[in-house]
Image: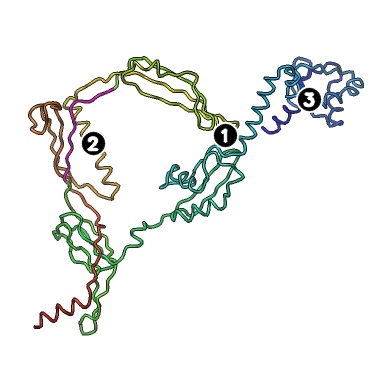
Amino acid sequence: MLLSILKWSRGYVTILLRGSSQERFMNLCRNKKILLWDMHTSGRYYICNVSVDGFKKMRPIAGKTGTRPVIQKKIGLPFLLRRYRNRTGFLAGLFLCLFFLYYSSLFVWKITVEGQYTHTEEEITKFLKTKNITVGTKISEIDAAAAEEELRKHYDDIGWVSIEITGTRMYVRLAETNMPPEAEAEAGESDLVASHAGRIRSIITRQGTPMVEENEEVEKGDVLVSGLVDIFGDSGEILETKRVCADADIMLETEYTYKDRFSMEYELPDYTGREKRSYGLSVLNYAFFAENPLKTIANFEKYDIIVDEKEVHLGKNFILPLKIIEKRWREYHSAVFTYSREEAKQEAEKHLQRYLAAISEKEVTVLDQDLRFRITKAGRDRKQTEASAVSTAAVSGTIRVLEPQKERREIKRVDPGENKEEDTGQEE
């Protein structure tokens, strides 16, 4: 790419070789270090490219071999300037364009984040912005090593990060490590308590004093594993009570109450086919449109806006601060439809599956479901007002699940003086 630009800036010509000693002509050009490229045949002639300086050096070789190089095409900046030497406006625009390309190459116009898992690209770029690294930052002002160090310090779960600037694009490559959540790592002296009422299906205690057994019924808030651990002496007396962070694997069988309600009527856009397009150019994030479409869409009651932006770049990594924008306004009318009973059941099933997917992310296992589906006709539901009286579909019931118990309650410290007064009062 760079070599092609260099050849174009110096200028070159496409020549056709005529004569009986074309091979000897090319060998002598090689001996004289005259570069010929893109060579191919056309009938019994050879066609190739040569620089302007190389073409001038061919004259004695042509006389010696009887081969005549004929110019077919002149390509490059010197010929372009000569052709338009009387058009000062065009030349000024050309030099302005070249200056714009050079000036744009001094800044970062795109930041790409790779390798992230828990952190989004927006999150990483937002943090870099606080360190004055953003789109439009001058490349010479970016300290990549310092930015890498700041990222590692701010995010504990990022074990490796690399920042590389290629062209006008900045690559942020990182690798995340599996670190325990800060809340769990810093948990203090606490008990494990029941988050719901239910039955203990399994309990494996690692630290603390278990207060329940398998198949035991518990209520919400009951202590499952105490963070108070008694230290006994040889004779069985309590020597000391330690306060620890209770730790255990506990599975609780409990029931979730599930309720879902939605209208039997729903709206879908009915597109009329009328639309308005407008094209524009974004320069340094400032958009300019060829025309104002607002006059045309003033009589659109409802419409969607679809924006398509295409970056302008030279090669993969030379991004320019230019974007070609296509904006479309599509008119539509709202069409009201009513679910059939089967369609309403399918919609209710979609809602239920989204709910089950959400609780499964919390390591909750669904055992069985006891759900009822019903449709309430308009006017039969006392909660409906006259203005909003429409038929509704509802699903309600219970879902029996196995839920890991992770809820904690801090162990309250008791002032030793208060205990002493309490004991004295009992003795009296």
Residue 360 percent coordinates (x, y): 27, 46
Q: Give how far across and how far down residue 318 sits, in percent.
A: 59, 35
Image vertical order of residue 15 relative to residue 358, above or below: above
Q: Residue placed at 17% from the left, 52% from the top? A: 254
Amino acid bearing label 1: Ile
- Which quarter shows the C terminus? bottom left
| Main secondary-structure element of the magenta-colored stretch | strand
Q: Specify the quadrant of the image occupied by residue 203.
A: bottom left
Disc 3: which residue? 50
Mark 1 = which residue? 319
The Cα atoms of the two marked residues, 2 and 1, are separated by 44 Å
Question: Viewed as shown, does residue 12 lie left or right of 226?
Answer: right
- Does 33 appear above or below 217? above
Instruction: Check disc 1 and report its element: helix, strand or loop.
Output: strand
Q: Amino acid at mark 3?
A: Val
Q: Residues within 10 Å of mark 2 (few under 14, many from 20)?
A: some
In this picture, residue 154 sits left or right of residue 381: right
Q: Is residue 262 magenta?
A: yes
**In-front residue for pair 181/79:** 79
Q: Which mark is residue 389?
A: none
Task: Name the residue nearer the viewer: 179 or 171.
Answer: 171
User: Disc 2 designates what residue?
Assistant: 351
Query: Is residue 246 on the magenta stretch?
Result: no
Alpha carbon distance from label 3 to label 2: 70 Å
Color encoding of the figure? rainbow
Q: Residues within 10 Å of mark 1 (few under 14, many from 20)?
A: many
Q: Quadrant of the N terminus?
A: top right
Q: Is residue 293 above or below residue 126?
A: above
Position of 102 compared to 111: left or right? right
Foreground: disc 1 or disc 3: 1
Span shown in magenta:
257-268
